[in-house]
Image (cartoon, coloured by chain):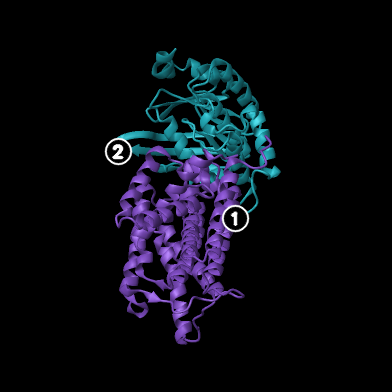
Amino acid sequence: MTKAPFMTRETVVNTILALLLLGFPLAAQTMGEPFYITLATRIAILALAAVGLNIALGLGGLVSFGHAAFFGIGGYAAGILATHAFDGVPLLAGIPGTASMLVIWLVALIVCGLVALPIGAISLRTTGVYFIMITLAFAQMIYYFAVSWPAYGGEDGLSIYVRNEFPGVNTAQPLPYFLICYALLMAALGLFWLLRGSRFGAALQAARQNATRLAAVGIAPFNIRLVAFIISAMVTGVAGALFADLNKFVSPSMLSWHMSGELIVLIILGGKGRLFGPVAGAMLYVLIEYALGGITERWQFFLGLILLGVVLFARGGLLGLLAGKARHG
Amino acid sequence: MAEPILEIRDLQKSFGALKATDGVSLTLMPGEIHALIGPNGAGKSTLIHQISGTFRPDSGTIRFLGQDISGLDMAARARLGLGRSFQISSLAQEFSALRNVMLAVQAQQGSSFRFFRPVMSDRSLTGPAMAMLERVGLAARAHLPAAELSHGERRQLEIAIALALGSKAFLFDEPMAGMGPEGSKALTRFLDGLRKQAPILLVEHDMDAVFALADRISVLVYGRVIATGSVDEIRNDPEVRRAYLGEAA
C-alpha cells in the first residue's frame, strides 16, 4: 500500500467546514445575535437530513425523490408525542406522549425504518427514472394523508408549545439546541464515514457502479440497496424531529416534494457521495436563501442559476471544487 | 465415469422469432477445458448468460455440482461457485483493481452486512486480493481505477475476480478478445494451469488458443450444438468445416 499523507486535502476542507459551522454560532452568541444561531442550527439539521439521503443517493446511486416522507415522519413523531405529553392525553391506551428528545428520536428512527422497509422493497424493484417516480409517489401519499388527517392539525400543521427536553441541557436556549443538532450531525457523518469504508459500503458503492458485477461475485444488489435505503431514511427521520423542534412547528410542508427536491439540491450543490458534501451544500443553500432572500423574493431563481452552473461546470459540487476528485483507495 | 461439474440439458431460449438457444445439451467434466466455438451470432454468449443466471432459459435444466440451479439468480449461482468473466468487461469502474478483487474476497468470506470495520486496512481482504492480482500478473496495477486499465488488463482483472471467488467452475466469455499476441500466449499458459483448480467452459474466437487448450470442443451454430468432440475430431468433422472452420480458415 502506498502511504497516504497525514491529512489529504479533503480532510483539511472537511475540518475547516466543521469548524466554520461550529464557530459561526459561537461568535453569534458572543455578539448577542441569536438569529444567526438559529440559521446555523437550520444548516446543521438540513445537512443531517442530507447526510441521510447521501447514503442512498451518494453511495448507492439511489435517487430517492421521496425522502421528505422520512423528514416529515420524524417531524410528526416529535410533534405528536410532544402534543400528547403537553395535553396529558395518552397516545394510545396506556402509552403516554413524551417531551424527551431521546425517546422522540428513537421513535422517529423506528417508524422511519418501518415505513422505509415496504417503500424500499417496492421501489427498488425499479431503477432510474421509475425509481425516482415511485419514491415520489409514496411520499405524496404520505403528504396527502397528513393533509387530510384532522387529529393532528391537517393542513394547518401542529405546534409544539415548548421545545422538547434533553437531559442536562436547556433546549429553549438557541446555542445549547444548536450544539445538540451539531453533535448529531457529527455522529451521522461518523456513521457515513464508517459505512462507506466497510464491507457493506464496498458492496453498496459497487451496486451503484455496476450491479451486474456485484451479482456476479455472489452479492445480491437488492438486499444491499434495501438496507442502505432504510438506514438512509432513519437518519433523515431524526433530522426531521430536530427540525420540528427548531421551528416548534410541524406541517405537511415537511412532507412535500419540494422538501425532497431541496435535499437532493443540497447534495448536488455540495458534492454527492462526499462525506462533507451535504454540509457544504446546506451551508451554501441556507446562505443563498438568507442573503438573496433579503434582497428579492425570487431568490430561488438565482439558486436555479447556481445549480445550473454546478451541474454544467462543477459536477463534483462545492467539495469537488475545494478538494478535487473523490478517491476510492 | 466421474460426475459432471456442470450439466446442461435441452436448453431452449427464444427472443421473439429468433431461437438463440435451440435444444443445447453439454457437460463440463472435472479438470477439463471445454471450448465453445461458433460463428458470430451462434448464441454462445446467450448460453453463458443462461448458465450464469443473467436471464432464464425458456425450458431445460442446468445442474451444477449435482444441484438444479435453473431457478436461482446470478448472485446465488455465484455463491455456489460458478465464476464468470464477461464478454464486455464488467467491473466497478471507479474502484481500483485491488478493490474489485477485494469485493470478490469479501463475498467469498460470507456476509457483506458488516457495517463498521474498514476494508482497506483489513488484511484478510487485501492479502488474498493482492495474491490473486499477482497470479494474473496485475499486481503492479493494483491501485489504478479499473476505468484506467487497458482492455487486456481488464480481462486479466475479471479472471482474478473469478479466482478470488474460489469458483468450482469457470465460465469465460472471450477472455482473449482485444489482447495482443503476447497477452494471448500468457493467458493461454495461465488457463492451461487453471484447469487443475476448476474446469473451464471457454467461449473463444482465438483458434490457436482453443486448439492448444481444449480437451473437448462443442460447435454451436444457430443455437444448436452441431458437434462435440476432441480437437482432432472437430478439426476433421466435415459438417463443422462446412459450417464454421471452412469460412474462417
Where residue B174 appears, as percent x and y from the top left, is: 49, 26
Judging from the image, mark 2 belongs to the subunit labelled B
Which residue occupies the foreground of this view, A171 or A188?
A171
Q: Identify the secondary structure beneath mark 2.
A: loop
Q: Amino acid at mark 1?
A: Gly
In the image, residue A116 sits, relative to residue A317, either above or below, namely below
Q: Residue furthest top?
A: B249
The total of numbered circles placed on residues is 2
Task: For the C terminus of chain A, give its image quadrant.
Answer: top right
Local packing at callout 1 (Cα closer than 10 Å; few below 14, some 14-19, many 20+) is few
What residue is disc 2 on? B16
Where residue A89 appears, as percent x and y from the top left, is: 45, 87
**Is any atom of residue A114 visible in this view?**
no
**Is any atom of residue B166 visible in this view?**
yes
Q: Which residue is found at the position 35% from the left and 50% from the top?
A: A303
Q: CA distance from mark 1 to mark 2?
A: 52 Å
| Same chain check for tags 1 and 2 | no
Q: Which residue is found at the position 38% from the left and 27% from the top?
A: B41
Colour chain A appears in: purple
Q: Which residue is found at the position 57% from the left and 43% from the top?
A: A10
Where residue A128 appears, as percent x and y from the top left, is: 38, 47
In the image, residue A192 sits, relative to residue A239, either above or below, namely above
Q: Identify the secondary structure beneath mark 1.
A: helix
Colour chain B appears in: cyan
What residue is disc 1 on? A190
Which residue occupies the foreground of this view, A242 or A117?
A242
Q: Amino acid at mark 2?
A: Gly
Where residue A239 appears, as percent x and y from the top left, is: 48, 64
Which residue occupies the foreground of this view, A83 or A124?
A83
